[in-house]
Amino acid sequence: MYTIARSTAIVALILFGLAACSSSNNQEPVTGKGAIRALHAIPNIGSVDFLIEETLLGAVGFKDATGISEFDDLEYAFSFEIDLPGDDADDPTVLSTRTLKVTTEQEYTFVLTGSLDDPQLLLWEQFGKNWADEVATANDNDTEVTVMEVSFGHVSSAVGAVDIYLEKPGTSPVFAVPKASVSFSDFQTATELLADEYQLIVTPAGDPETILFASHGFEFSPATSMLITLMDDGGVTTAKFSVSLIGAGSGNDLVDINSSSVISAVHAALGTDPLDLYDSSDFTLPMIDNLDFGSLSDETDVDDGELNMVVTPADSLGVFLSQRSINAFSGSYNRLYFVGLPGDLQIAAQRYDRSTLATHARFQLFQGAARFQTLDVYLVDLETDIQLIGPTFSNILYGTGVSYVNRESGTYNVFIAEPGTKNVVAGPLQVILEKNRNYSLTVVDSTNIAVADLLFFDDTAQP
């Protein structure tokens, strides 16, 4: 069971001289305040900035939201900006702008959707609930607030019109009434619910027998306001779309209990013949078969939960070379690394995702060279002398890695060195990194005990 507890106290943001920097309409008398937040729903552009006039309200990542800020009921210009490769530091790219006359006690959510080439801005608005007053009144009357409220939005291009159910866990939607029916860009204002445990289910509109998404059970806390939003997943998980719970701060993604997980593997064990991988609960067919040293397997769907992995020589089921249990969470991508010297095969694991960036390449690495306890990694421009700089990644332990980092498109050199020295043990390996693609590098042993080798993969090319 997951508990979703959000503070819904509106965060007051006091900006000195704000009226002076806004439009001329802001000379009108102030009668109250409205609430503002931003939601980022473009899957492959990374973090963006949300501004009022020229003042930054917050940086917001994909599937996340800014905190709620209060502003006087005047007119302001709101915008989303992004720093693109080639932009001047003081002149970022403006994705979208909108002028809004704030209304007292209204809550506004600016939703950035579309794509980098065609960004779209939606505005969702509703009455802003003042839970602090509700709680104070209940306290005065020696009672408690037992309810909360939830609103619904839809900005996923991967699914059409849907019905959304919130019921006791295990309740079939066939025997329930949808709490919301929404299509792309729709927003349904808040409805009040008892603060209790719920399961969220999404079905096609008018078709309660077809389950598109079903969450684990979770709890809503009393005196809270939540925004449930369907968004594109963008390769973060194996699901076609995601469902986020957004309160007064950033959001939490719900997990689809029916989403399969994915396993792939890299054979990084020098001197070990081709390998098969089995789930110990089923030795009928290998999950991955006949994987050669230096190779990356295809991705294989597996059930979520704990998996007991067994590695054998190819076509030799009776010989167990290594075993390991991993937890394959629903919708997760899991990469196994078969590492170690002959006679000491081990299984290491690293979680990854398949989301890409329209602005940058993404690069990850794994240290699978058993003869080197730790290594420094340099990922540098071709003209860079590593004697003059520190490592890009330092002291990477054997059997561990670095998750994806972003790099501008271009050609780079990769050097691997002993930690704290410039003693190169592998490289330079020249690699070409292109935006909208993911790459991985695995350090492996070589036949020379003083030298490591490098395996470079284009992860985007996985089927």
Image (cartoon, helix red, strand yellow):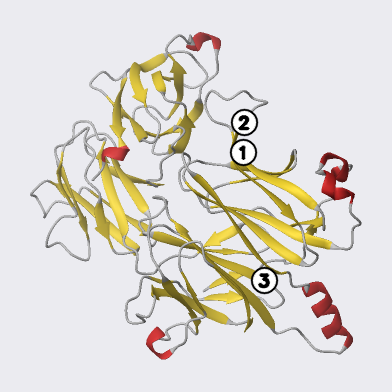
Q: Is residue 40 left or right of residue 132?
A: left
| Mark 3 Cα shell of 10 Å, populated few (<14), some (14-19), many (≥20) | many
Classify mark 1: helix, strand or loop.
strand
Residue 413 position, x and y percent, is 39, 17
Q: Is residue 370 left or right of residue 362?
A: left
Classify mark 2: helix, strand or loop.
loop
Q: Are marks 2 and 3 in contact (CB under 8 Å)?
A: no
Residue 92 marker: 2
Question: Does residue 103 sit above or below 218 in this rendering?
Answer: above
| Mark 2 Cα shell of 10 Å, populated few (<14), some (14-19), many (≥20) | some
| Mark 1 Cα shell of 10 Å, populated few (<14), some (14-19), many (≥20) | some
Q: Which residue is mark 1?
A: 81
2 vs 3, front mark: 2
Type of amino acid at the residue the image marks with label 1: Glu
Q: Which residue is mark 3?
A: 225
1 vs 3, front mark: 1
Residue 33 position, x and y percent, is 83, 61
Q: Can see residue 15?
A: no
Classify mark 3: helix, strand or loop.
strand
